[in-house]
Amino acid sequence: MSQDFNVYDVVLKQLDDAADELDLDPQIKLLLKEPVRTLKVSIPVRMDDGSINIFNGIRCQHNDALGPTKGGIRFHPKVDENEVKALAAWMTYKCSLVGIPYGGAKGGVECNPKKLSIGELERLSRGFIQAISPIIGPNKDIPAPDVYTNSQVMSWFMDEFSKIKGVNSPGLVTGKPLVLGGSFGRDSATARGLMYTVREAAKALSIDLKGARVVVQGYGNAGSFSAEFLHELGCKIIAANDSCGGVYNPKGMDPFKLRSHKTDHSTICDYSDSERISNEDLLTLECDILVPAALENQITPEIAKKVNCKLIAEAANGPTTPDADRILTDNGIIVIPDILANAGGVTVSYFEWVQNMYNYYWTKEEVDSKLERIMVEAFNKVYKTHLERNVTMRVAAYIVAIQRLNEAMKARGWVE
Ligand code: GLU
């Protein structure tokens, strides 16, 4: 969502760093540099007043060496091609890192969903799926929720695609409601996965989670559930914000009360038991764990210089710029990178898809324990690589991800 710099350059830089460390075959690097397919569409939507509006949408499929491409669709006033390409590439690395059989994709529709009526939102959702239907499908490319899309939007996507194909197709999208083939635990999966990585990192770094001070930037799905899970581990949520503003209380706030405040008032910025705090002050507040759970490009070098925590767990995709990353490393701050910290979402999406394909459904306990196993294993692989190679956790995560992609592309015969 940044206008001042190209977020796709961030991905290329991250690829470069890991490729250098791995001495990666230049042909593999070339294949990872550009997405395989990007489809741009215009979606005409009849508005409630009878007029027609044209919305721009995009779906980008980055790499499908490991399986059908997978990734969310965001509805946001600012969606640009480079940003969607970057988000698609991050999905490729994320899926590879946690060992699930998917490539990476991402989509976006430029709109302000807060200003659309429910009927307009439904027509836009259906129109977008009609427009991209030739390139998606349960064995091709599987969308999911992302910023400002939810299980209702997924239901319309699934229903529209099923009508187009004449076949009930629950495996087309993940993040559906339970009644349409959704999975237990999908709504809170990103945050649950993040909590497992924080728990493992705390063990490795000897951070005591009892009373650990947590700051959460962004109180949407990932941010709010992260606050709740970390609170359950004994942490204290001392500050949080959303697009309207931030709240701070050094004694800690009850994340469940913050959630119900958000539900009732659609923001947390006027929550009573707290002081107001700006976005910059929130990101640089002295704390133990910082959870950026909003958008890309939030921790810039200027902010990074002032960040005052022990651990950053990236719930959002791409919240830290490469220059900022270097500053954090120099200052001894450990970052659990996005492609690891927030991989719980797509992991439970994979579980949802498997259940759809089998038409046989698992209990919440089964989902949670399978997720825990995958996240702990992924964390340990990355942490081990970080120690063995003396690289940052981000470079380590890319190394683990790229090694698997390299093997798959070679086995397919895409390179010698
Ligand atoms: N939008 C989420 C992400 O960025 C989930 C993607 C998915 O479940 O496919 O990881």
Image (tube, helix red, strand yellow):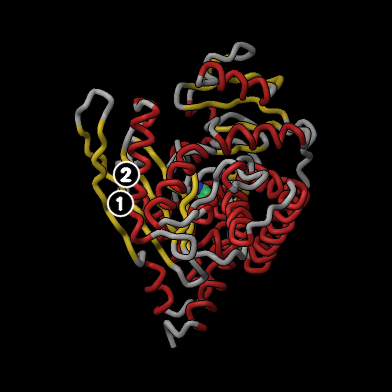
Quadrant, the C terminus: bottom left
Residue carrying label 2? 127
Quadrant, the N terminus: top left
Tag 2 secondary structure: helix
Query: Dot 1: few (<14), some (14–19), or many (≥20) neighbours within 10 Å?
Result: some
Q: Please indicate, yes or no, whether residue 340 appears anywhere in the rendered image.
A: no
Task: Name the kind of residue labelled 2 in the image.
Answer: Gly
Task: Say which residue appears at 65% left-offset and 66% top-offset.
Answer: 385
Between residue 333 and residue 141, name the one nearer to us: 141
Task: Say which residue appears at 30% left-offset and 41% top-offset.
Answer: 3
Label 1 near ligand 1 (CB < 8 Å)? no
In the rendered image, the vertical position of residue 12 relative to residue 199, given as above or below: below
Task: Say which residue appears at 72% left-offset and 28% top-offset.
Answer: 236
Between residue 183 and residue 111, name the one nearer to us: 183
Name the outermost residue toward the top. Answer: 272
Tag 1 secondary structure: helix
Between residue 90 and residue 276, name the one nearer to us: 90
Residue carrying label 1? 131
Q: Position of residue 82 (x, y in %)?
A: 32, 52
In the rendered image, the vertical position of residue 296 relative to residue 246, given as above or below: below
Task: Name the kind of residue labelled 1 in the image.
Answer: Ala
**Callout 2 touching callout 1 (CB < 8 Å):** yes
249 lies left or right of 244: right
Between residue 75 and residue 358, name the one nearer to us: 358
- Between the C-alphas of marks 2 and 1, the distance is 6 Å
Task: Say which residue appears at 56% left-offset and 17% top-offset.
Answer: 264
Q: Position of residue 409 (x, y in %)?
A: 48, 78
